[in-house]
Image (cartoon, rainbow, N blue to C red):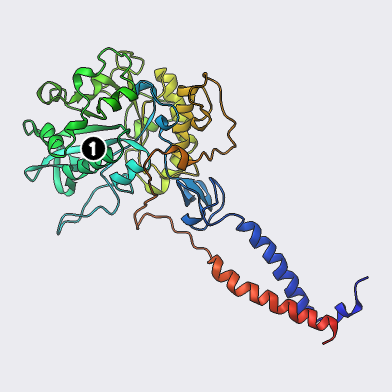
Amino acid sequence: MLSSSLWEIPSSSAILYIFLTLFSFLISISFACFNGNCQVLEACTAATDCGSGLYCGNCPASGKNQPVCTRGQAIVPTSVINGLPFNKYTWLVTHNSFSIVDAPQLDGVQRLTFYNQEDTVTNQLRNGVRGLMLDMYDFQNDIWLCHSFRGQCFNFTAFQPAINTLREVEAFLTENPTEIVTIIIEDYVHTPKGLITLFTNAGLDKYWFPVSKMPKKGEDWPTVTDMVQQNHRLLVFSSIASKEAEEGIAYQWKYMLENEPGDPGVVPGSCPNRRESKPLRSRSSSLFLQNYFPTYPVEAEACKEHANPLFNMISTCYKASGILPNFLAVNFYMRSEGGGVFDALDKINGQTLCGCSTLAACQAGAPPGTCKSIPAPNTGSMSSTSGSFTGSVQFSKSSASRVHSPNLLVLWLFYLPLLAFLKTTINTHLIGF
């Protein structure tokens, strides 16, 4: 039977004790995972709460203000199922990979252009990006990465000499001898032999996939194993047809189908081919690039764009073409409501490589349709499937989504002694001291 002395406790102290006990319980639930233990879609307050390959972010554009652990890295498909022809895989491509928020400006010049990505090309590659879309121009007696007005680069739209980015690619390929990278050039370079000289000076000629070995009639490409063994690990495509004969740089639309970029490529229910591309139902090219980005990029909207609208457009383009994309090109690739572009890639590769609902369910060497059981949402281990490299989530300072929450350590340092003091006070009163 409860002692009657309990009723002698000052009511304010009793209520405070009960409140703090309940608050302790709620806090323990709210912060059930932290210090790197949280998985996809679990609540977080900082990136350090989340597991490997994840960051802590939210998506106000979708009304999702609660920060959750969000995927920031792709599972490289060859790390799960290897040895198939190159065109059997789907690879992540960054649109205008060089157009990075907070990129250094030319001295004394205010840049007046838009941005498409938030981290360095090196970090993009380390996070599983395997295709780079680069706009190259003659500028300042060199070749630069730039946005354009009528095919001309200006100092207020220029980013940097192209060789700087190509040296990042060279370093990545050297450090990761089993990885393959594709570069798709919007080409405004008219200097004779300018591009091939640029790639040679960047040290990339040793990784060059020769045009003579590219399939011309829609056949399968060599296997990724053969490409690695031959060290043909860099595919380069130009938007100028004459560069193929003049410099040995493949003309993009001879080998690749492509849907319309920009706003026409994100209209629900529609997937027209780009004007320069063959019809999407053509089978004379064995690669398909699907563009999925609006004409004018908005960082804050990208997380919403990379949810259901993305999956719906992949389905729409599949109906239009009869094939799933080999390259999926996006802006702000890390922005999502949780899985985003990475989940889309996993679903495509899972279906095409092993007949499973997601890549993480595939089993190397097993018959198609033999799938592992994967919990939902898919939180497949990044550390065990991301190859020999490591990436990081690297939003720019101005674009990073800041999460304002009380510091858990400070909260407990204040709260626990207070609770212990109150409990001691109440117990003392109960026993009559």
Q: Which corner quadrant holds the N terminus? A: bottom right
Q: Which corner quadrant holds the C terminus? A: bottom right
Q: Which residue is drawn at 33% across and 16% down?
A: 220
Give SS at disc 1: strand
Q: Residue at x 48, y 38 (%)?
A: 307
| Residue 168 position within the rendered picture, expressed as x and y whole percent measured from the top left | 24, 43
Residue 330: name its quadrant.
top left
| Residue 267 position within the rendered picture, expressed as x and y whole percent measured from the top left | 40, 31
- Amino acid type of the residue tagged 1 in the rendering: Leu
Q: Which residue is drawn at 37% across and 40% down?
A: 388
Vertical arrangement, residue 40 with respect to residue 195, above or below: below
Q: Which residue is drawn at 48% across and 30% down?
A: 359
Within 10 angstroms of label 1, few (less than 14), some, or many (20 or more) residues? many
Of residues 316 and 55, the one nearer the viewer is 55
Of residues 49 and 226, the one nearer the viewer is 226
Query: Is 426 left or right of 242, judged from the image as shown?
Result: right
Vertical arrangement, residue 42 with respect to residue 384, above or below: below
Read off the residue under disc 1: 134
| Residue 51 position within the rendered picture, expressed as x and y whole percent measured from the top left | 50, 49
| Residue 242 position within the rendered picture, expressed as x and y whole percent measured from the top left | 12, 23
